Image (cartoon, rainbow, N blue to C red):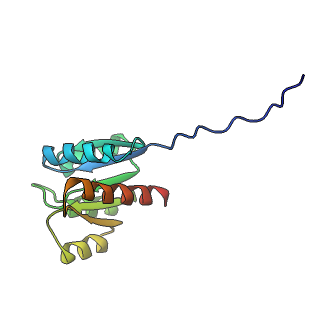
């Protein structure tokens, strides 16, 4: 008996999406990581840093698919980080994820090259579900 030598299907495991999450609040980094992982996001690999300056160092050393940044941070803000990245030709998709801001901040973020603006309104479950959808959408583009 001769067996067909059919090619084996590629692994059905989705590609891991590497996320650089920037927030000056360690609690916010941890809560977001936990809730993103709870939303059946085994395909997310999340690296958290506590400052924009630390994010810039990480980006020199590692590759990320998406950057998620808080807006209001001591030292360099999320918008200043975005501006620095875009001025250096870094086109990694950027999500401003913040509880502070509003329409004016959203407009400024888009003007500076942000890909998305997600608010931290509501509880962690709803905000992280929205963030997860946004990250997946950007990673597919």
Spot the residue most to the right: 1
Residue 107 percent coordinates (x, y): 26, 76
Q: Quadrant of residue 79?
A: bottom left
Residue at (26% x, 44% y) in the render: 33
Q: Nearer the viewer, residue 137 or 72?
A: 137
Residue 85 percent coordinates (x, y): 31, 58
Residue 90 percent coordinates (x, y): 37, 57
Q: Quadrant of residue 98?
A: bottom left
Q: Is residue 104 in sight in this rendering?
A: yes
Position of 140 relative to 44 (above/below): below
Residue 38 percent coordinates (x, y): 31, 44
Q: Tell me if 64 is positioned left or right of 124 in this view.
A: right
Residue at (49% x, 43% y) in the render: 15
Location of the N terminus by quadrant is top right
Spot the residue most to the top: 1
Q: Nearer the viewer, residue 111 or 26?
A: 26
Residue at (42% x, 43% y) in the render: 43
Q: Quadrant of residue 47?
A: top left
Q: Tell me if 21 is positioned left or right of 8 in this view.
A: left
Q: Tell me if 121 is positioned left or right of 89 in this view.
A: left
Q: Is residue 93 in sight in this rendering?
A: no
Residue at (17% x, 48% y) in the render: 28
């Amino acid at each position: 008996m001769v067996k067909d030598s059919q090619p084996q299907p590629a692994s059905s495991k989705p590609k891991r999406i590497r996320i650089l999450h920037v927030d000056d609040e360690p609690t916010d980094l941890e809560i977001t990581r936990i809730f993103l992982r709870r939303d059946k996001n085994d395909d997310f690999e999340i690296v958290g840093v506590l400052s924009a300056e630390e994010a810039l160092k990480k980006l020199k050393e590692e590759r990320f698919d998406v950057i998620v940044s808080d807006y209001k941070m001591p030292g360099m803000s999320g918008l200043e980080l975005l501006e620095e990245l875009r001025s250096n030709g870094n086109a990694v998709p950027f999500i401003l994820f913040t509880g502070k801001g509003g329409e004016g901040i959203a407009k400024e973020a888009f003007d500076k090259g942000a890909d998305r603006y997600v608010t931290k309104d509501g509880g962690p479950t709803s905000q992280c579900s929205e963030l997860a959808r946004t990250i997946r959408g950007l990673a597919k583009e």
